[in-house]
Image (cartoon, helix red, strand yellow):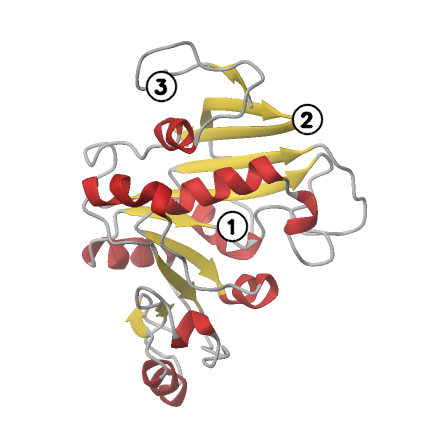
Amino acid sequence: MRRLFPVTDPTAEGETAGGDREWSLAELAAAYAYPGPDARPGGWLRANMVSTLDGAAQHDGRSQPISSAADMRIFGTLRALADVVIAGAETVRQEGYRPARARAEFAELRRAAGQGPAPVIAVVSASLELDFSLPLFTSPLVRTLILTGAAAAPDRVAAAERAGARVVVAGDGVGVDPARAVRALAELGHTRLLTEGGPRLLGQFVAAGVLDELCLTVSPMLTAGDAQRIAGGPSVDLPRHYTLASLLEEEGFLFSRYRRD
């Protein structure tokens, strides 16, 4: 993995990073570390997405075909750094979400940060039409959260709770208010937030102005077709400006990290 845009040196001994060698997980964790709590009081929300050269966020409804081994290493690292992973209900269904697992490589790092053994998975769903027999609900290492609105159907809320999930109200109507969702998670102690989409959920975070950072993998592939972009939904009044924080490359894949001004 080659570093193209140096910002800070993630190596413990201060040696020059980069070249064509594969970075260690410790180096990746240092490069992608969350900023301190003073950077954004109330929580720091980052997104992790992948896109082809022609803007497709998926192929045949899934992101895996446009990913790579290095992308998955960064995916795993970002999860290991997070308190909570937020995903939309459709993404949970399409990607076959499972509970986050504890990884020995990151155990000491998480202990030092005061975190549990694995991040919480938080599913955003207005309808709560989810399969509560899946391991995500029946056997997570840490209890799965469901973010929904105050007007969610009581029988579905009851079904979620019977399955072991914790339902968190983050909206006055049927749906979820993105800014309120971030606040609700922070109030539960989850201040290092990671969203993996899908595009509709990411678009809602962008429109609400609460996305602090975007980790975007640019895949050296072309798919054509009409696949979704990484963010969907209504457009914002004015484009939001983000600043490039770092850029890595491996085998033509670009791993960028942008932070909002």
Q: Is residue 64 visible?
A: yes
Q: Name which residue lies at 33% across and 11% down.
A: 14
| x, y percent for residue 12 | 30, 19
- Residue picked out by circle 2: 252
Q: Name the front one of labels 3 and 1.
A: 3
Inspect the image, locate mark 1, and give the three-letter code of the amino acid beneath it. Answer: Gly
Corner quadrant of residue 111:
top left
| x, y percent for residue 223 | 79, 44
In the rendered view, would you say 53 is above or below 43? above
Could you tell which of marks 2 and 3 lies nearer the N-terminus? 3
**CA–CA distance between discs 3 and 1?**
34 Å
SS label for mark 1:
helix
Inspect the image, locate mark 3, and give the three-letter code of the amino acid beneath it. Answer: Thr
**CA–CA distance between discs 2 and 3?**
23 Å
Q: Nearer the viewer, residue 19 or 161?
A: 19
Corner quadrant of residue 35:
top left
- Residue picked out by circle 3: 11
Q: Is residue 174 visible?
A: no
Corner quadrant of residue 102:
bottom left
Mark 1 nearby-residue class (10 Å; few <14, some 14–19, many ≥20)? many
- Residue picked out by circle 1: 203
SS label for mark 2:
loop
| Quadrant (top left, top right, bottom left, bottom right) of the N terminus | top right
In the rendered view, would you say 52 is above or below 128? above
Inspect the image, locate mark 2, and give the three-letter code of the amino acid beneath it. Answer: Gly
| x, y percent for residue 132 | 45, 80
Q: Name the front one of labels 1 and 2.
A: 2
